[in-house]
Image (tube, rainbow, N blue to C red):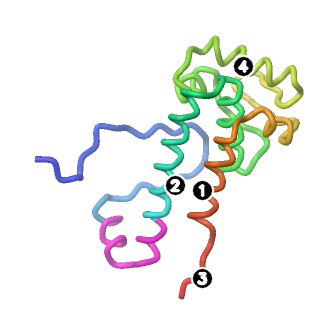
């Protein structure tokens, strides 16, 4: 019997940092007890579903260089840094392409002066230039996260 307390997925951490692991029952209790927690988790879920749908569209309709620019920009936004640590292998896995394809796309972004890429370290040199090389999918995803997750009054 499936009751929603089981998943076949696994979590993969792509960036260093701190994390908190909670029992699902504790999250469920807080979800039921506090409207603020419920509203935040539902808004995040909605934003994440929107990102998944937009990413699926992006992978079907846009070039790899645009997709890679989107991926880098979204990671920068979430890490709030111009320095990222991502291997070509991990980027290829996230984009669903071969590592060699990521190598070529990253080289084009580097030749365009947008990034510097060396041994799993990406430095964004020209964010504006990177934004011009991505598709509208980046802005759609970013706006949806901002719309759903911007701080709101507690009353």
Mark sitting earlier along the chain (3/2): 2
- The residues bearing labels 1 and 4 have C-alpha atoms spaced at a distance of 26 Å
Residue stretch rendered in magenta on the structure = 26-40
| Residue at the (46%, 49%) spot, across then down | 49
**Would residue 1 be counted in the magenta stretch?**
no
**Would residue 27 be counted in the magenta stretch?**
yes
Q: Which mark is residue 105?
A: 4
Q: Which mark is residue 144?
A: 1
Residue 80 position in % (x across, y down): 73, 51
CB contact under 8 Å: marks 3 and 2:
no
Q: Secondary structure at mark 1?
A: helix
CB contact under 8 Å: marks 4 and 3:
no
| Front residue of 26 and 60 | 60
Residue 121 position in % (x across, y down): 74, 29
Which residue in the structure is indicated by mark 2?
Answer: 47
- The residues bearing labels 1 and 3 have C-alpha atoms spaced at a distance of 19 Å
Which residue in the structure is indicated by mark 3?
Answer: 153
């Amino acid at each position: 019997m499936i009751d929603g307390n089981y998943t076949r997925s696994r979590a993969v951490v792509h960036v260093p940092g701190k994390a908190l692991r909670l029992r699902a029952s504790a999250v469920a209790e807080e979800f039921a007890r506090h409207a603020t927690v419920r509203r935040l988790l539902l808004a995040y879920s909605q934003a994440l579903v929107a990102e998944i749908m937009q990413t699926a569209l992006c992978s079907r309709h846009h070039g790899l260089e645009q997709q890679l620019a989107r991926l880098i920009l979204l990671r920068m936004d979430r890490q709030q840094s111009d320095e990222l640590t991502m291997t070509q292998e991990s980027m290829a896995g996230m984009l669903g392409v071969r590592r060699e394809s990521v190598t070529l796309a990253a080289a084009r972004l580097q030749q365009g002066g947008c990034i510097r890429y060396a041994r799993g370290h990406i430095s964004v040199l020209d964010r504006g230039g990177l934004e011009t090389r991505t598709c509208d999918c980046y802005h759609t995803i970013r706006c949806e996260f901002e719309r759903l997750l911007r701080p709101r009054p507690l009353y």
